[in-house]
Image (tube, grey):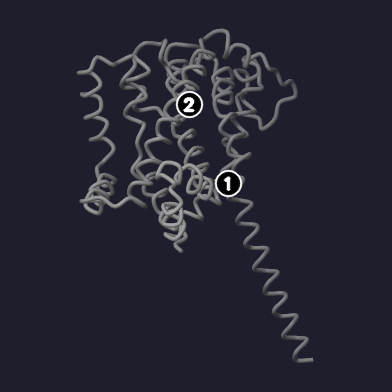
């Protein structure tokens, strides 16, 4: 009887603990997801319905897609999307080249001053972003690259954190593989492409996805370096819509534009979420 009572007490305690845990998680999920629900709901309401609501409703009986049509026809949102795609793809491609080559050099090659160079590189992470933005702005302006894709892209093609993350992954690959490849006459570049990159593919995929998200959400730098609407990205385009478009008056159309901007990233994350988690976990595991 005592064992049964203890067992029942343990089960009851576990059930109460699980109930409290899942209740708190559910409340937290509602708090996090509610702004997205409200954004989508507002984008589906007509301007008249939204304007006549003295008390905001959590539903709509007459959903409409007219706001999405307005978002792409009344402002050049399609051009902003194209600019963002170009900026994201080119920046991510160049960043991958720089990151992979730099990580390989710090992880596998032996050269004088390597440890000192890597220490200095890591110390750059301590510099406030605002100082870097000011320096980059002066440099790009002096080079006459304002309102150009080159001016948008160049300051974003390196990342100390990504180099460090990939370098740690490369360092986990046994030295025996490298020495055996050298004995067989394999060059460093071939070893990198044929051995190291395939082994560390999860981390490289994670870096790629994170960089795509970073570029898509980029706001401060494009806002500083471009004042020509032909080079606006979606983040700056949303601000432009709010300031000079229909945003201040037509909130549902504004929300439709925001939904259109957010959807690609949400889909990207949902598709690759397991690879992102696997890559981050691998980067944090030594040995």
Residue in view at x 68 percent, y 69 percent = 16
* Image location (x, y in percent) of residue 193: 48, 42
Could you say which quadrant of the image residue 13 lies in?
A: bottom right
Residue in view at x 46 percent, y 26 percent = 88
Residue in view at x 40 percent, y 45 percent = 188
* Image location (x, y in percent) of residue 180: 45, 56
Q: Residues within 10 Å of mark 2 (few under 14, many from 20)?
A: some
Please identify the residue farthest to the bottom as the structure is shown: 2
* Image location (x, y in percent) of residue 202: 54, 47
The residue that mark 2 highlights is: 89
Q: Is residue 181 above or below residue 155?
A: below
Q: Earlier in the sequence, mark 1 or mark 2?
A: 2
**Marks 1 and 2, Cα distance to the nearest angstrom?**
19 Å
In the image shown, does 36 or 129 lie closer to the viewer? 129
The residue that mark 1 highlights is: 275
Could you say which quadrant of the image residue 172 lies in?
A: bottom left
Q: Are marks 1 and 2 in contact (CB under 8 Å)?
A: no
Instruction: Identify the disc placed on residue 238.
Output: none
In the image shown, does 95 or 107 lie closer to the viewer? 107
Q: Is residue 244 above or below residue 118?
A: above
Q: Residues within 10 Å of mark 1 (few under 14, many from 20)?
A: some
């Amino acid at each position: 009887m005592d064992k049964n009572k203890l067992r029942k007490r343990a089960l009851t305690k576990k059930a109460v603990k699980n109930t409290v845990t899942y209740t708190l998680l559910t409340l937290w999920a509602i708090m996090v997801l509610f702004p997205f629900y409200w954004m989508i709901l507002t984008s589906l309401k007509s301007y008249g319905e939204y304007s006549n609501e003295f008390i905001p409703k959590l539903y709509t009986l007459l959903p409409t897609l007219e706001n999405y049509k307005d978002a792409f026809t009344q402002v050049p949102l399609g051009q902003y999307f194209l600019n963002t795609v170009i900026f994201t793809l080119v920046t991510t491609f160049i960043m991958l080249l720089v990151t992979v080559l730099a990580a390989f050099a710090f992880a596998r090659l032996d050269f004088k001053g390597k440890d000192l160079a890597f220490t200095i590189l890591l110390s750059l992470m301590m510099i406030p972003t605002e100082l870097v933005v000011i320096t980059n702005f002066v440099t790009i302006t002096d080079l006459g690259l304002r309102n150009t894709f080159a001016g948008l892209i160049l300051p974003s093609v390196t990342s100390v954190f990504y180099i460090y993350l990939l370098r740690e992954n490369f360092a986990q690959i046994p030295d025996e593989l490298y020495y055996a490849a050298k004995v067989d006459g394999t060059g460093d570049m071939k070893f990198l492409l044929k051995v190291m990159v395939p082994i560390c593919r999860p981390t490289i995929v994670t870096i790629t996805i994170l960089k795509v998200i970073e570029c898509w959400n980029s706001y401060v730098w494009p806002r500083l370096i471009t004042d020509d609407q032909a080079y606006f990205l979606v983040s700056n385009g949303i601000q432009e819509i709010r300031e000079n478009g229909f945003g201040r008056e037509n909130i549902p159309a504004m929300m439709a534009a925001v939904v259109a901007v957010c959807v690609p990233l949400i889909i990207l994350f949902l598709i690759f979420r397991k690879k992102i988690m696997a890559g981050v976990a691998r980067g944090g595991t030594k040995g």
